[in-house]
Amino acid sequence: MFEKKQTWSESILIYKDIRMLRIVLLGAISGFPWVLIASSLSLWLKEEGLSRSTIGWAGLIFGVYAINYLWAPIIDRIQIPFLTKRLGHRRGWIVLMQIIILLGLIIWSFINPTENLALLISVGLMIAIASATQDITVDALRIEQINPDEGKSMAAGAAMAVVGWWTGYKLGGVIALFTAEFFQNIGIENYWQTTFLILGVVIILMNIGLMFIHEPITVDRQYRQKETDEIIQSKLGSNNIITRFIAYITGTIGGPIISFFKKNGFSIAIGILGFVFLFKIGEAFLGRMSIVFYKEVGFSKGEIAIYSKTLGWITTVVFTLLGGIFAMRAGTIKTMFVAGGFMAATNLLFAALAWSGKSEWLFALAVIADDISAAFATVAFVAFISLLVDRTYTATQYALLASIGTAGRTTLASSSGAMVDWLNGDWGIFFIITTLMVIPSLVCLWFIRNKIKIGAK
């Protein structure tokens, strides 16, 4: 018996669920730190006279997002004194990480980049670690807002998470760029340092909003994790502090991995991991150098804020919601193929902009196309790995899959600045290369498309 296909109006109505508003806020909390260590840090270093290669290699701090699954089990189990009892397990961890990020901004406000570059990058690394740690909890809390059998709501939730992330990133970028330009125009010498204090206020406001997000009670998850530990410990044949520690490590680190391979089979699991690693590498190479490219072409901070941030945010929100509906109706697999084609076409537009010189209409067109492709790609990707996770290991397994995806985008894309320098500043060829980077992931997805075990393909 076939299920009746959902109409467009029925798909749109899913977004009216109050849980979707909570997911938007969680996404914003997750996306905002990227403004600090991506756009703001890159432009700050650029305006202080540092080279493209230095700016690119500074992006290695994003590598922590690729390994945050290593400490995800700790976040799943360890409670924060005072905060956990007052706020809940997930929210307690988020608030603690937000405090660390706020402290990082305060330290940045006292640093001169040319004199203390090592300290500046170290603080950036601290912010990145706090942000990556926060993401583990944010993703788990977001997934736990939706019941396991609500596949279409999960796709809608993925769209709203992306809307929230880009809201935090894009609007946060608007605040950062316009504030920095304002302080620069009125003659404040250390205008970026002053801007970071204003961004600290945004962190405080987000923590206030966090208090309105419901945290489900997850006693069942904790019971099943403990049950797994006991099974492993019983196989070790004794009960002492060493065997209990081995059981804990095996159950929390090995359990999610074993569960993933058992569910999908070894060859399909490897195919999934390969796709996840490769999918957004081309986009990451473009994104890492985009703000440097805009500046070199001749756009001001205000123009970048209007076209890349404000216009980009509106486009992202609209097409993320449409991407969520597309994913609900066509499935995540087809949506990712469409998104891959969009990403390749978008990079070609940036190549055209590089060869034509400063052109506001072409800049706007490239930004719109980039945000459309990013919206479709991220919705499908988030829904895809959300549907793959085992609810017994929500935080750990999602963090593992997300980290593998981040590994490709962060570690390899850190060489983006060096690549532009190697090409003698030929941005057009650079964007052509990023276009070709999309192909391997789509080939990988093609071979596993009919064998992936998720609720809706």
Image (spheres, rainbow, N blue to C red):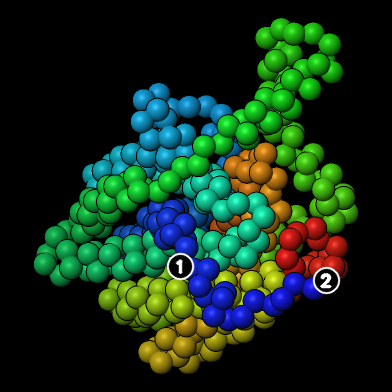
Q: Locate residue 280, reporting x and y percent.
A: 63, 66
The answer to whether residue 96 shows anywhere in this view is no
Total number of numbered discs in the rendering: 2
Q: Which residue sits at x=75%, y=59%?
A: 454
For residue 453, which quarter of the picture? bottom right
Q: Which residue is mark 1?
A: 16
For residue 249, which quarter of the picture? top right
Q: Which residue sits at x=70%, y=15%?
A: 244
Q: Which residue is mark 2?
A: 1
Instruction: Estimate the spatial distance between the alpha carbons at disc 1 and disc 2, rounded to whole Å.
Output: 29 Å
Identify the element where label 2 is drawn: loop
Q: Nearer the viewer, residue 60 or 215?
A: 215
Question: Outermost residue toward the left?
Answer: 186
Q: Which residue sits at x=45%, y=73%?
A: 317
Question: Outermost residue toward the front?
Answer: 1
Which image quadrant: the C terminus? bottom right
